[in-house]
Image (tube, grey):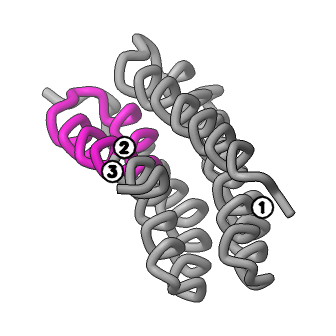
Amino acid sequence: MTLLNLLETLLVIGMLGAALFVVRTRDLLAAVVVTAIISLVAAILFYVLQAPDVAITEAAIDAGLTTAIFLVALRKTERYEK
Amino acid sequence: MIPGWLWILAYTLIGLGVLLGLLRAFLGPKTPDRLVAVDALVTITMGLMVLLGLWYRRGIYLDIALIYGALGFIATLAIARYLEGGL
């Protein structure tokens, strides 16, 4: 097990923790912020798996567009889940 | 050539940074704390991508770090604008 595998394991555990946090939290804005971590780790995993084009698409769509769309949707509703 | 201990040092420091950033993103009591933690994680990830591009010795991998650095900024900007009351 090399050091890079250890780093990937840490990142995947962080991705799992972020997904659990997003599902369980009541604050929807915090959920939108933490969703960025999931896309971040997905981009790194595509990168390490030697798929740079997929990683570029993941970075472009998920880092910029998804958060903006979620925020525009959140503006129309309430911030805290009942 | 880059010596082996320097790789180990770089990966260890990046791992520590990721760990602390994840901790603050999960524990942060208010949303700006989480936002700053995620922004720091994007920067650390950019550094990791450049480092791995050097490790694999392929130039195209640097473009991903470039695009991530240019677009990771938009999410932070949108959330900051939301917190301020605009958008």
Q: Foreground: B50 or A19?
A: B50
Query: In the displayed structure, does residue A64 sit left or right of residue A21?
Result: right
Q: Which residue is drawn at 58% across and 31% down?
A: B17
Q: Mark 1 sits on what residue?
A: B70
Q: Is mark 3 on a helix, strand or loop?
A: helix
Disc 3 from disc 1: Cα separation: 27 Å
Disc 2 from disc 3: Cα separation: 4 Å
Q: Is mark 1 on a helix, strand or loop?
A: helix
Q: Residue at x 30, y 27 (%)?
A: A27
Tell me whether the residue at label 2 lies in contact with that at label 3, contact meaning CB atoms closer than 8 angstroms: yes
> Looking at the rendering, in which quadrant would you find the C terminus of chain A?
top left
Residue type pointed to by label 3: Thr
> Looking at the rendering, in which quadrant would you find the N terminus of chain A?
bottom left
Q: Give the range drawn in magenta.
A: A10-38
Q: Is residue B77 visible?
A: no
Q: Is the magenta stretch mostly helix, strand or loop?
A: helix
From the viewer's perspective, is residue B68 above or below residue A57? above
Residue B42's disc number: none
Where is residue A69 drawn, in percent x and y?
48, 60
For disc 1, the chain is B
- Have a look at marks 2 and 3 and say if they share a chain: yes
Q: Mark 3 sits on what residue?
A: A9
Residue type pointed to by label 1: Ala
Q: Mark 2 sits on what residue?
A: A10
